[in-house]
Amino acid sequence: MEKNILGEKIKDLRIGKGYSQDHLSNLAQLSLRTVQRIENGETEARGDTLNRLAKALEVSIDELMGIKLSTGNNNGYLALINISGLACMFVSFPLLGILLPVILRLAKKGKIADIDDQVKTIINFQITWTLLGLGVFMLLMMNIAFFHVPIFHGLGGLGAAEVMLLIPILIFITNAVQVLINAARIWMHKEVKYWPVIRFIK
């Protein structure tokens, strides 16, 4: 953001509140000369100075910088974040279903409302299903190796190998259906609903 634009924004907010430069400097605990230089575009407010001015003017830093969180026009991007959780299905790398939503979130951080909630939901969902799939696979392997419990009887004559191949496919399909349904719900401005979800990230 250009220095003079930020300075003008601060000046407009200050005047709108009826503050003098001296009063603003006292509220922000900055020197009067610093406030004057920022408003005149002679220097740029950054870091702690920007935080102090935002607090004194009772606005968020995003508002002070002229950045507005968008809501209604980015449902497509939020839906994409949900769909990105399916990436792991195409490269057989479960962590990609967690990493890709995070990368997409960072690309729009601070620019889309509710994006953090969406990312947390999809990550929690993908972690839950990854652990579920691994847990089922390990139980089946342990049963085959040690216990030999006939849990496959009555499954249409399928053997252990067929069942072990079928279970992850069913898990993937269930995962994909929920993700796609929720992507559509986001597009239609509806609340997402995932099940089961363990809240690893709050």
Image: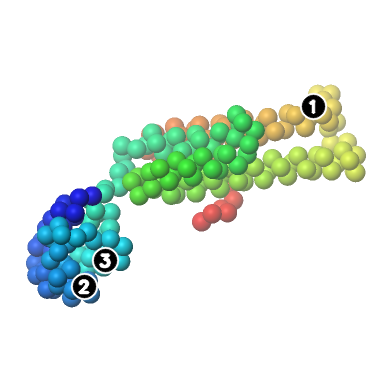
Q: Nearer the viewer, mark 1 or mark 2?
A: 2
Q: Which residue is mark 1?
A: 162
Residue 35 lies in quadrant: bottom left
**Nearer-the-camera pick, 87 or 129:** 87
Q: Are marks 3 and 2 in contact (CB under 8 Å)?
A: yes
Three-letter code for the amino acid on which mark 2 is drawn? Leu
Residue 28 percent location from the top left of the image: 22, 71
Disc 3 on helix, strand or loop? helix
- Locate residue 157 relative to residue 71 in the image: left or right: right
**Nearer-the-camera pick, 21 or 82:** 21
Residue 160 percent location from the top left of the image: 83, 31
Residue 54 percent location from the top left of the image: 24, 63
The residue lying at 82 percent from left, 29 percent from top is: 161
Disc 1 on helix, strand or loop? helix
Q: Which residue is mark 2?
A: 30
Question: Mark 2 packing: few (<14 Cα in 10 Å), some, or many (20+)?
Answer: some
Q: Which residue is mark 3?
A: 49
Three-letter code for the amino acid on which mark 3 is drawn? Thr
Question: Mark 3 packing: few (<14 Cα in 10 Å), some, or many (20+)?
Answer: some
Whether 16 is drawn above or below 109: the answer is below
Three-letter code for the amino acid on which mark 1 is drawn? Glu
The residue lying at 56 percent from left, 39 percent from top is: 97
- Locate residue 31 relative to residue 121 in the image: left or right: left
Q: Earlier in the sequence, mark 3 or mark 2?
A: 2
**Nearer-the-camera pick, 44 or 139:** 44
